[in-house]
Image: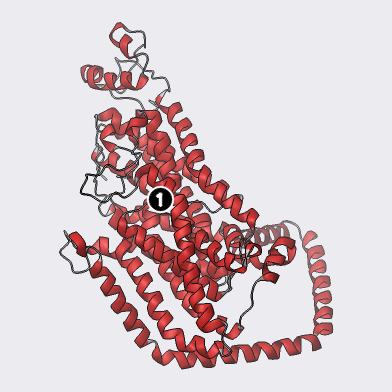
Amino acid sequence: MTQSDDLGAFLWIVVLGGFTAFVAAFGIGANDVANAYATSVGSKALTIKQACVLAVIFEFAGSVLAGSAVADTIRKGIADYGCYQGGYMDSAILMYGNLCVVASVALWLGLASFLEMPVSTTHSCVGGMIGMTIVAKGKDCVVWTKKTTAEELYIPSGVVGIVLSWIFSPVLSGIFAVLLFLFVRTLVLRTKNAFSRAILFYPVLIWLAVWINSFFVIAKGIQKKICDDGKNFLCYSSGDTKGWNALGFACAVGFGVAVLCLPLYKKIKIYVQAEFEDKAAAEANQATHTVDVGNALEAKEKEVAASETTASEGGARAWASKLWDDTKKHATYGMNVDIHASIEEDEKVQALHDNAEKFDPMAEAVFRYIQVFTAICDSFAHGANDVANAMGPFMAIYVIYDTGKVSKKADVGDDAYWILALGGAGIGIGLLLYGYKIMRAIGVKLAVITPSRGFSIELGAAIVIIIGSYLGLPLSTTHCQVGATTGVALLEGAKGINKWVLGKTCVGWVITLIVVGFSTGLLMAQGINAPITGNPDEPGSIQYEFLDSECDEFVANKYDWLRYVNDTLLPDTNAVLPTNSF
């Protein structure tokens, strides 16, 4: 890292920004990633431990291997970065502004996760950028919408696009998910031989899932990484053929995977049959051993009580052992908690699950394997895109400090890998420790999720995300996932959805921009209005009074006064602003 000498005094922003970015990544894991895995865990296709392991591996792999494609994340499309290209002070203000953004995002994601509200990480960052820009530069520097010529197709972007996406992305995701589930329910689940039908349609469903998810990964991750000025055959072409190369390649990949999996279909059928035979035998033996199990549990409780008594008499060693056990228990609570226990604990949730249509469990088991694959693909794609986007504010801080200037297209270079690795690590820890709350809210409390429903939900959401990515629409994966879940649930009627959880979720979407924008604005206002002190006779220090005759005309706007100090007075004194300038 070769930081600019001009911005060397602001190293503290880089250090603090890295710490807050890690905390924000923790919140992403607890909220955004947990929401992506909620349907897989809710349908019992994966356990929480399995979801955590897959998320840590593929979110991390996606962010490091494909996420560097968005190393120029400094251009956000919400703030006009041309307003921040006025020199030294503009660079410093933008660094501090991005620090405020990432701090506000971290706080909001943590609070939203605690309240079991799935919110959009991308929209949280956008809200912070809006608040920061309005305070620092005014509303005219916010990109409210995209300007197009008469010949161009108008695609909503900026703040207008974000607001419209609150409506269109969940609705469209719900429509696609409903169509997919109606197809599966009609041709497979409601037939007399549902299990045999599921095996028969398995190759088709594998091809469809691989095709759509492969295009998602290629178009939003790998493609951007390997493209070289549009010359690679996977890269977007120009004009009307844009995206067709990636679409065709993904289709071929799906067909190839479906063919390669043909030998596995009979094995899956045998495995599922054996699984349910063993399950039936276990249930038959359970009643016989009920008394023995009860006696064993009673004996175990007495043994534990005796050991606790011994531990209390064992002094410091026993206390240390108990402290370690308690710490381990709390640290692994998020991995071991039973999110499905809320079905019996909450009457509304129990009624929701009791009223849902039941299908052949063996047919549902076939969809479990497909759903695991879609979860892996979504996780890699999420890591390749949303993780890098969420780390964008810290990337902006780092690039400005490294280059000493603001640029709409600034390449982070190889440093992007450790930045994205920092985000990947934070995401994994956040999901492990706190992701269970969002998984429980969306995967259990919002609606009934079975493997067939979960497959339709994940694929329906992926289709809309792909379309949005292709058109450049600012869609949120969180909104698409919840919209698809709601659509499938409403096929059961109004009783198929938990209105309280859905209402709380929608409120969270709307207030995300407001809360993060307002909190970022407060932090930004505090920073740029902090007093400047020092002695002009000492290097690295400066002190000027606001009522100085040379500065009278700038008193009303302290930002302009700071620019005046930088451009006019600092060169005469060879001074630099101190680290507490903000």
Q: Is residue 195 above or below residue 218?
A: below
Q: What amino acid type should be assigned to the residue bearing mark 1?
A: Ala
Q: Nearer the viewer, residue 539 or 291?
A: 291
Residue 58 location (% of width, % of height): 41, 67
Residue 425 location (% of width, % of height): 44, 58
Left or right position of 379 against 230 = right
Residue 9 visible in the picture = no
Q: How is the image coloured?
A: secondary structure
**Callout 1 secondary element:** helix
Residue drawn at (41%, 83%), measured in percent from left and top?
Answer: 204
Q: Quadrant of the C terminus?
A: top left
* Location of residue 290 by image quarter: bottom right
Residue drawn at (84%, 71%), measured in percent from left and top?
Answer: 302
Q: Nearer the viewer, residue 282 or 189?
A: 189
Residue 29 visible in the picture = yes
Residue 276 location (% of width, % of height): 62, 88
Q: Which residue is mark 1?
A: 390
- Exactly how many numbered labels are in the figure? 1
Residue drawn at (40%, 66%), measured in percent from left and top?
Answer: 463
Q: Is residue 254 above or below residue 27?
A: below
Residue 569 location (% of width, % of height): 25, 17
Q: Residue furthest top?
A: 549
Q: Is residue 392 above or below residue 471?
A: above
Q: Residue furthest front?
A: 150
Would you call the spot at circle 1 few (<14 residues within 10 Å), some (14-19), or many (20 or more)?
many
Q: Is residue 183 above or below residue 8?
A: below
Left or right position of 348 against 206 = right
Left or right position of 322 against 193 = right
